[in-house]
Image (cartoon, rainbow, N blue to C red):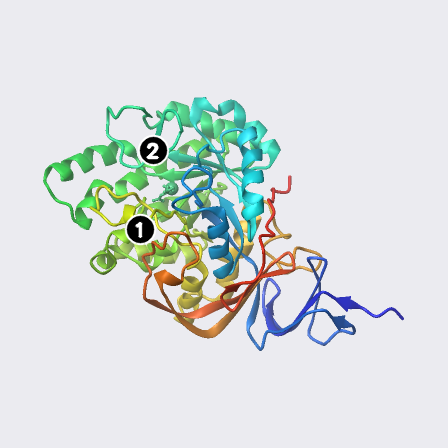
């Protein structure tokens, strides 16, 4: 009889089977999950990991990562961001398209694949960007070429040469294309609908923001409350409302990125109740912070959309509990520490997040806010299903990619900015204590992170949705 040889056996774990956690062993061969068994299977293992009653979960997916690569690699790059991902238990990231050059056509997509692959410690999908009339004809080719979804930065002005986002646009600024008019946006919805893929929107109404921001700025106020008055809940509500209205008419699979308001959650909930394929995500900074934290955290927590009020936080949690919000992702958007260390109004928006996403959610499990099964849904199964990569990603089904995150729910850790693997260490969660920590990250059978250490060279590959 031929003796079975296993590449890697993970023993004595609580293995997630999509419904329950089963005590047993997981066997990996050729980068795939070969077997899961409550009993020990015959054969010899090249590598054995004693999970010692830790949890063995489908690898986490962070669908919202800005690695600034290429274009602003002094802030972050893919070599760093994917180490941060692996350190945080993330096995797949979706890279955002607002790079320089942006992912606005197939040529730039292929260049981006070649640029990212040698630096990738985890697998990755690549978003395509919608620039309105500037690249409407590129949407179908980008779909054919395998983007993971389409992103539209609704309400942002962009640099007319580089198409980079203008963070603090004012009417009349030179060298920028102002935010697109609704008619052009409508055509984006129409074009993306033809692909059957997700259209993900940054939802903040620029006209409201410009007007109200000017009013508070003129008053001389520079505090966080003033920032929120200039960039109010209403701005998000109005754009989500317009987006939903267009998606209902056109059948577009609309996804609302980084929802920050209770109003947003309610609109999405209502559209789902009416049967439309509209989805939403939120981020740890909206779930674990509110305006009340600004005094303690400071400008590091400036992000667009801004972190709102306690009542918004509560509604976001309700949205998670009833499934309105189906994904939690980081919106990892680093800037340098120097850039973030200034006047609240002039500094850029965004912070690191890919490494702290899972620890913060696991801590929420320890605190009884959600269950570990919900974490598997929010970080693995739901994103994989929504973006068309399930069950190869997002499940531990036999025969699929061995993307695995082992988590230790008894381990305690204090998040410290200096320990982050990102190039710049800008986080709103410095000194935040967590219970529940990723202990190992395995990508297609390769152990990439073990006990906080990166233990592999870049082995990540680009993934495309299943058509
Ligand atoms: C993002 C960035 O810097 O790329 N910033 C942010 O505050 N979230 C852009 C974005 O997603 O809006
Ligand atoms: Zn955004």
Measuring from the top left, give residue 191's x and y in whole percent. Answer: 51, 27
268 versus 426 height, above or below: above
> Residue at (14%, 40%) from the top-left corner?
216
Q: Nearer the viewer, residue 243 or 177?
A: 177
* Label 2 SS: loop
* Number of marks present in the image shown: 2
Do we see residue 111 in this rendering?
yes
The residue nearer to you, when weighing 78 against 26, is 78
**Mark nearer the N terminus (2 vs 1):** 2
Horizontal and vertical percent for residue 190?
49, 27
Question: Which residue sits at x=51%, y=61%?
Answer: 89
Question: Which label is found at residue 316?
Answer: none
The foreground one among 110 and 168 is 110
Q: Quadrant of the N terminus?
A: bottom right
Disc 2 Cβ-to-ligand 1 distance below 8 Å = yes
- Which quadrant does ligand 2 occupy? top left
SS for callout 1: helix
Mark 2 or 1, which is nearer the eye? 1
**Residue to which mark 2 is pinned:** 156
Separation of disc 2 and disc 1 at Cα?
24 Å
Q: Residues within 10 Å of mark 2 (few under 14, many from 20)?
A: many
> Residue at 24% of width from left, 24% of height from top?
172
Q: Residue furthest right?
A: 1
Q: Position of residue 404 (x, y in %)?
A: 59, 61
Residue 312 appears left or right of 189: left
Q: Quadrant of the C terminus?
A: top right
Q: Is residue 326 visible?
A: no
- The local crowd at label 1, few if under 14, some if 14 to 19, many if 20 or more residues have their Cα within 10 Å, is some
Give residue 199's position: percent from left, percent from top: 48, 37
Say which residue label 1 marks. 337
Residue at the location (56% across, 37% down)? 147
User: Residue 206 vs residue 64: left or right?
Assistant: left
């Amino acid at each position: 009889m031929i003796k079975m040889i296993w590449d890697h056996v993970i023993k004595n774990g609580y293995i997630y089977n999509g419904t329950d956690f089963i005590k047993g062993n997981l066997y990996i061969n050729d980068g795939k999950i070969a077997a899961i068994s409550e009993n020990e299977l015959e054969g010899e293992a090249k590598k054995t990991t004693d999970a010692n009653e830790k949890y063995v979960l489908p690898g986490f997916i962070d669908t919202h990562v800005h690695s600034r690569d290429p274009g602003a690699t002094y802030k972050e790059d893919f070599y760093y961001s994917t180490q941060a991902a692996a350190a945080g238990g993330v096995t797949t990231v979706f890279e955002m398209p607002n790079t320089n050059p942006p992912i606005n056509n197939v040529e730039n997509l292929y260049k981006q694949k070649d640029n990212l692959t040698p630096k990738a410690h985890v697998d990755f999908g690549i978003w395509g960007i919608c620039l309105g009339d500037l690249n409407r004809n590129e949407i179908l080719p980008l779909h054919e070429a395998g983007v993971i979804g389409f992103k539209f930065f609704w309400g942002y002005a962009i640099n007319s040469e580089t198409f980079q986002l203008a963070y603090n646009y004012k009417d009349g600024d030179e060298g920028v294309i102002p935010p697109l008019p609704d008619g052009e946006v409508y055509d984006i919805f129409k074009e993306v609908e033809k692909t059957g893929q997700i259209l993900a929107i940054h939802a903040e109404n620029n006209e409201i923001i410009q007007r109200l921001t000017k009013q508070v700025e003129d008053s001389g106020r520079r505090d966080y409350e003033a920032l929120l008055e200039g960039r109010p809940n209403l701005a998000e509500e109005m754009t989500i409302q317009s987006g939903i209205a267009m998606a209902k008419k056109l059948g577009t699979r609309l996804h609302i990125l980084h929802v920050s308001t209770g109003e947003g959650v309610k609109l999405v909930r209502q559209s789902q109740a009416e049967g439309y394929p509209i989805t939403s995500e939120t981020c740890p900074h909206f779930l674990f912070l509110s305006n009340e934290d600004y005094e303690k955290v400071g400008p590091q927590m400036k992000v667009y959309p801004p972190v709102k009020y306690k009542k918004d936080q509560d509604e976001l949690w309700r949205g998670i509990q009833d499934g309105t919000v189906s994904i939690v992702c980081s919106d990892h958007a680093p800037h340098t520490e120097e850039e973030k260390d200034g006047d609240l109004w002039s500094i850029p928006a965004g912070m690191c997040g890919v490494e702290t996403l899972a620890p913060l959610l696991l801590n929420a499990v320890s605190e009884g806010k959600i269950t570990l099964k919900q974490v598997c849904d929010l970080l693995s199964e739901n994103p994989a299903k929504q973006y068309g990569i399930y069950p190869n990603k997002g499940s531990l089904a036999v025969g699929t990619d061995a993307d695995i995150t082992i988590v230790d729910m008894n381990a305690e850790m204090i998040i410290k900015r200096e320990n982050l693997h990102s190039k710049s260490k800008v986080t709103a969660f410095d000194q935040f204590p967590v219970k529940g920590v990723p202990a190992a990250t395995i990508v297609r059978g390769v152990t990439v992170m073990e006990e906080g250490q990166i233990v592999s060279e870049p082995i990540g590959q680009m993934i495309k949705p299943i058509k």
